[in-house]
Image: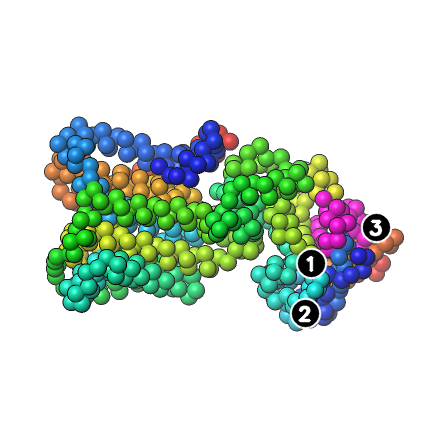
Amino acid sequence: MADRSALTVRDLVIAPGASAVTQTIASGEIVGLAGLDGHGQELFLKMLAGLAPPLSGSIESAVPGSSHKITGFRGAVASGIAYLPRDRRANGIFPTQSVLDNFAVSTLSRDTRFGLISPAARKARYDAYREKLSIVAPRPDAPITTLSGGNQQKVLLARALALEPAILLLNDPTRGVDVATRHVLYDVFRGLAADGMGLVILSSEIEEILLLCRRVLVFRENEVAAEISGEAMNTDSVITAMFGRAA
Amino acid sequence: MNPRLLVRARGMNPRLLSLSRSVGFAVVLLVILLAVNLILSPARFTPGSWGALVGLAAPLIGAAIASTPVILAGRGGIDISVGPLMGFVNAVVIQVLFLKAGISSPLLLVPAALLIGALVGAANGFLATVVRIQPIVATLGTYLILTGVTLTILPAPIGPAPAWLKALAGPWSILPLAVMFLVWWLVRRLPYYDQLMAVGSDDRAAYTAGVDVTRVRFIAYVIAGIFGGCAGLMLTALIGSADPNIGPTYTLIAIAAVALGGVSLAGGRGGVAGAAIGAIDIFLLQSVLTTFNVSTFVLQIAYGAILVLAVMLTALQERLAMRAR
């Protein structure tokens, strides 16, 4: 499955005056997005997710069998792109709802029997992901706010994975997550890539990107300042590119 | 009280706990008020007259249930046109359909009332979610329009109501209430319900989770309208005639009942059962004060005081619960 492209970005312009981005994200690949905060990497990720409209250019997903242009968020989800938002408290969890409800909200129709929700089916589906992500949640029907930050994040990841996406977009997925949980998440990400999912990870921590990715796009002033991969990818080269000095 | 709770109650499950916590105050108040009523006017509260009492309380319970879905949908969602909608349904069913057009069959009048409700709800929903006027302003517009239209088609009270409808006044008023609860119980089992609560809990998160926020809120207004139409029929049954001035008085009391019943006006918390208990509380309070022969002005003061107190206590409960965690 090595180089089958899953997501193709053509001449994408993030901000006025910035040069266009053309990229291909292959399935089974983990691509990192780095850059100083506010240099366009988050906007780029949101455009991939269909949450922000690009100024020009196109994004196309090539799920086996068909290819779709991404024009909106719902369309992106339908063509196999899942997005894990950055600010868990503001954009992720539903504080008044239970762990189960938080998990199932994106994939409600999969638990229905004759149009009505089957709690047993939902529980079974959740249990599969709880196992996979080793979520520590004593009671799935307790409010999600009773969980630790790391476990809340795992529930959100389970929500995104439940969509069974071909491409997973992660916006700083380990922010505010404890070290032990981080390593669980890293293993999960690697496992997903090995199973053929394409992952795009935006991270504010360079170590994380070096650990997970074989290729990193470094953003500066709303354009890709450098694409670094393989041996050339190390803390120094990434930081140099972030600050816009010649490598 | 709520079938889903019974189904889900394995031991003391946390959701049951949190629900009992949020409606807890309303239930306590219910018991107290019931006891006071039984002591003050035992004759009025003998088991034999409970049916009649349910009939008296039914329209308010219906109005409270109708006000709930939109409030659950959050972000300032509120439908203050429920009361005038009840008056409008009352006027149209009696004056236009029954007296002028001679239609008396429940098979036509009930769907007509529900359809009127659904259309008004859809109009509210369109204004509040598609045009994005603030819900309170949008439904205030509907409130005024409906009040005016009702007075235009029915300047003065007129009667009577069809016999079958009047028969729904006493103990049988439990029937439309039961239907409303059954419908809501079914809604709770639909994927829609989870989306509604998600939207009410945090609409940005709901959007990022792929929920069509606008559609969910729009449907909440339509459900409110249909329930409002049903409440209008219950009002018609109770007064056995058409009166253009009664409907609008239900709006604010219904919202007070919803708040009293532990439904968060910020959305995403509470349910129809709580709203109904809140409505019964208000009815019983009314009953206590009437025994003392106080004026209706004092009644208003009491509603206001109880409402503020209830919301404060609910907030306090929540804060204590958070700290306990």
Q: Residue B221, located in which quarter of the rendered image?
A: bottom left
Start-end of magenta stretch: A188-215
**In the displayed structure, does residue A221 sit left or right of residue B49?**
right
Magenta stretch encompasses residue A193? yes
Label 2 chain ID: A
Q: State the residue in front, A46 or A160.
A: A160
Determine the CA span between mark 1 and mark 2: 17 Å
> In the displayed structure, would residue B101 be above or below residue A120?
below
Determine the CA span between mark 2 and mark 3: 31 Å
Residue B312 x/y as whole percent: 35, 38
Disc number at residue A41? 1
Q: State the residue in front, B155 or A85.
A: B155
SS at mark 1 in the image: helix
Identify residue type, mark 3.
Answer: Asn
Q: Residue B160, located in which quarter of the rendered image?
A: bottom left
Q: Residue at x 45, y 56 (%)?
A: B216
Task: Characterize the local packing of mark 1: few (<14), some (14-19) or many (20 or more) Cα atoms within 10 angstroms.
Answer: many
Identify residue type, mark 1.
Answer: Gln
Q: State the residue in front, A113 or B210.
A: A113
Q: Earlier in the sequence, mark 2 or mark 3?
A: 2
**In the displayed structure, does residue B295 sit left or right of residue A164?**
left
Q: In the rendered image, which residue does mark 2 sit on?
A: A58
Q: Residue at x 28, y 34 (%)?
A: B30
Q: In the rendered image, which residue does mark 3 sit on?
A: A234
Q: Earlier in the sequence, mark 3 or mark 1?
A: 1
Instruction: Same chain for labels 1 and 2? Say yes or no.
Output: yes
Identify residue type, mark 2.
Answer: Ser
Disc number at residue A72? none
Residue A49 x/y as whole percent: 63, 59
